[in-house]
Amino acid sequence: MKKLTDIHIVLGVCGSIAAVETIKLAHELRRRGAKVTGIISPAGCGIIHPDALTYACQNPALTQITGMVEHVKYCGEGGEADLLLIAPATANTVGKIACGIDDTIITTFATTAIGRGMPVVVVPAMHESMYRHPAVRKNLETLKELGIDVVPPRMEEEKAKIAGIDEICLHVERAVSPGTLAGKRVLISGGSCREELDDVRILTTRSGGTMAKELALEAFRLGAEVTLVMNPMHGIVPCVKNIPVITAADMHAAVLREADGADYYLSAAAISDFSPKRVDGKIPSGRETSVTLEPLEKLITKISGRGVRIVGFKLGEDAEKEGVRLLDLPDVVLVLANRPETMGSPFGEYIFLQKDHKETVTGTKDEIAGKVWDVLV
């Protein structure tokens, strides 16, 4: 199911050049299942034409408040909309919202939405010098104090550029989620490790980190503060704290450091079980060679007993049997057992193992991630 199905979003567009990105944003919100109604300020109309926003939203764009009291219809008590998203938000509009000033369609919608208590997401975009103005920063803090989610800009080329579309959509999904992980800290390890065999070669696995990424994104949507420990070769996940690691030793150190204060630890990484005895230089090719593999300690046993709720993963022909044994460790509340062919694939079949329950779940890894959090919370 699409994350924003049955969600009605009012998308406000201010007079920033970043408004040119709003057309793509509206399309993406609709792809994720949302109904979108666009509103645009007079300054915004100088950047993009209202017809472009109408086309992108497939609903007539609104440019002013009329006798139909559109701000109440959509954002008032019992209104049609579920969320107000202002992207881009200029320094001018941020200041007016913070002070309760209504002199554009955007600010009037904002005051109505805040008064109703509906979710509001603001995405600032402006020149860096404006963004760093003490009054602007204070106004942004005021918005946060009002319960508004402010999506941080990208600081590039002396500009506080509008956040990426994926990041904005994730904040929207978080704002309309049930928030079952609000106030919780989630730690996830994912992807492969790389152990050096010589100056050229490495020992690794086929893991691409997909399961860990989906678990992290779903935890963020549900309101958690998320830390992901993973090899950067698998990419950087938006909206979460990314800690780059390469070897199993790196991952052990990072996870043990971040585990203090965590509520959940999900061990979705293909952490190296063996470390090769490293050879200096390059092992000559074209001849038979022996490699000594030294077993490594299991990270999950180091976390067990700290009071962190643990989710383990087991891969292989005997994964279910080994997963049942893993449940005997203190704090391990769930184990997912699967086969090697799921590694690196967007799909998978997992056996969910709990002390008193077993269930087979099949689907895409984002669907599996959703099921994991359903079970845990």
Image: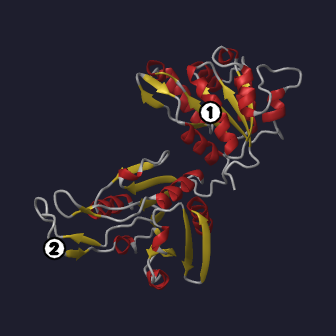
| Residue 24: mark in rendering | 1
Which image quarter: residue 63?
top right
Color style of the picture:
secondary structure
Give the quadrant of the N terminus.
Answer: bottom right
CB under 8 Å between discs 2 and 1: no
Q: Around disc 1, counting alpha carbons within 10 Å, would you say few (fewer than 14), some (14 to 19), or many (20 or more)?
A: some
Give percent across and percent down for residue 104.
72, 18
Q: Residue at x 45, y 68 (%)?
A: 308
Residue type marked 1: Lys
* Foreground of the two, 111 or 318: 318
Check disc 2 and report the residue beneath it.
288
Q: Around disc 2, counting alpha carbons within 10 Å, would you say few (fewer than 14), some (14 to 19), or many (20 or more)?
A: few
Disc 2 vs disc 1: which is toward the camera? 2
Q: Secondary structure at mark 2?
A: loop
Residue type marked 2: Glu
Give percent across and percent down for residue 194.
29, 61
Q: Residue furthest front?
A: 286
Q: Residue at x 46, y 62 (%)?
A: 344
Marks 2/1: CA distance? 56 Å
Q: From what the image shows, is residue 30 above or below residue 225?
A: above
Which image quarter: residue 251?
bottom left
